[in-house]
């Protein structure tokens, strides 16, 4: 009987994590699910930017990691389009970092990853690039800084 209870509880936990649900409610939305579009703490001048939750998984450290798509940003570097030709970055971010970034639930996104050639390229080229507990805003600031480094000769 004890084994059945433990097995049932384990299946319940796996189903919650597998669905991408979070235990931290945000603006009455109790579960982060794939396809959700959110407003987040943006950089100045990018208030119209939005993010979409694309995927989630559990990493080797047993932490939930989300893959997100960020639209409406303004990276002022000529090299940005080399990495993101459509001007839309995709990043992996920890659950804590994502929750620290989100401000308002917008709704279900119409974007479809199966028809986005740029996302397929990113997924192939950058499969293990993630940030631990950083925010979306912090990631974008760092990305712009790195792209604008002038090493000289």
Image (cartoon, rainbow, N blue to C red):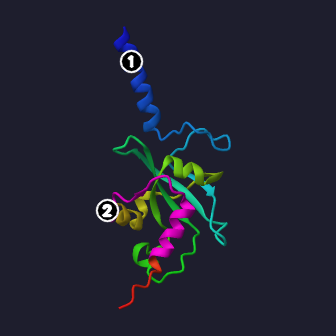
Residue 51 tag number: none
Side of 34 relative to 29 (left or right): left
Q: Nearer the viewer, residue 146 or 72?
A: 146
- Asked where in the image residue 116 lies, by quadrant, the reply is bottom left
Q: What is the C-alpha distance between the residues marked 2 and 1?
A: 38 Å
Describe the element under mark 1 as helix, strand or loop. helix
Q: Which residue is mark 1?
A: 6
Q: Is residue 140 magenta?
A: yes
Estimate how packed mark 1 is, as few (under 14), some (14 to 19) or many (20 or more) residues with alpha carbons within 10 Å.
Answer: few
Tell me where the magenta segment starts and ends, as one range: 124-146
Q: Residue at x 55, y 66 (%)?
A: 71
Picture residue at 50% right of the left edge, 47% below the top: 95
Q: Residue at x 49, y 75 (%)?
A: 145
Q: Quadrant of residue 32?
A: top right
Q: Residue furthest top?
A: 1
Pointers 2 and 1 in contact (C-beta within 8 Å): no
Q: Quadrant of the C terminus?
A: bottom left
| Disc 2 target residue | 124
Is residue 83 in the magenta section? no
User: In the rendered view, does 48 fall on the left or right side of 32?
Assistant: right
State the image coordinates of residue 118 (x, y, percent, origin top left): 40, 68
Examine the rendered structure and indicate whether residue 104 appears above or below residue 9.
Answer: below
Instruction: Estimate how packed mark 2 is, as few (under 14), some (14 to 19) or many (20 or more) residues with alpha carbons within 10 Å.
Output: few
**Relative vertical location of residue 48 with respect to residue 58 in this rendering, above or below:** below
Q: Residue at 57% across / 70% down in the picture? A: 73
In the rendered image, the quadrant that contains the N terminus is: top left
Element class at badge 2:
helix
């Amino acid at each position: 009987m004890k084994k059945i209870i433990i097995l049932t509880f384990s299946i319940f936990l796996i189903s919650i994590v597998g669905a991408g649900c979070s235990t931290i409610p945000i603006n009455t939305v109790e579960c982060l699910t794939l396809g959700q579009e959110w407003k987040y703490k943006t950089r100045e001048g990018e208030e119209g930017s939005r993010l979409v939750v694309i995927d989630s998984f559990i990493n080797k450290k047993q932490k939930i990691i989300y893959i997100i798509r960020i639209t409406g940003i303004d990276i002022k570097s000529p090299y940005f389009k080399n990495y993101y030709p459509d001007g839309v970055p995709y990043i992996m971010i920890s659950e804590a970092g994502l929750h620290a970034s989100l401000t308002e639930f917008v709704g279900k996104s119409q974007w479809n990853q199966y028809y986005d050639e740029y996302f397929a390229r990113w997924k192939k080229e950058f499969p293990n690039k993630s940030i631990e507990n950083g925010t979306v805003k912090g990631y974008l600031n760092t990305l712009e800084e790195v792209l604008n480094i002038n090493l000289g000769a």
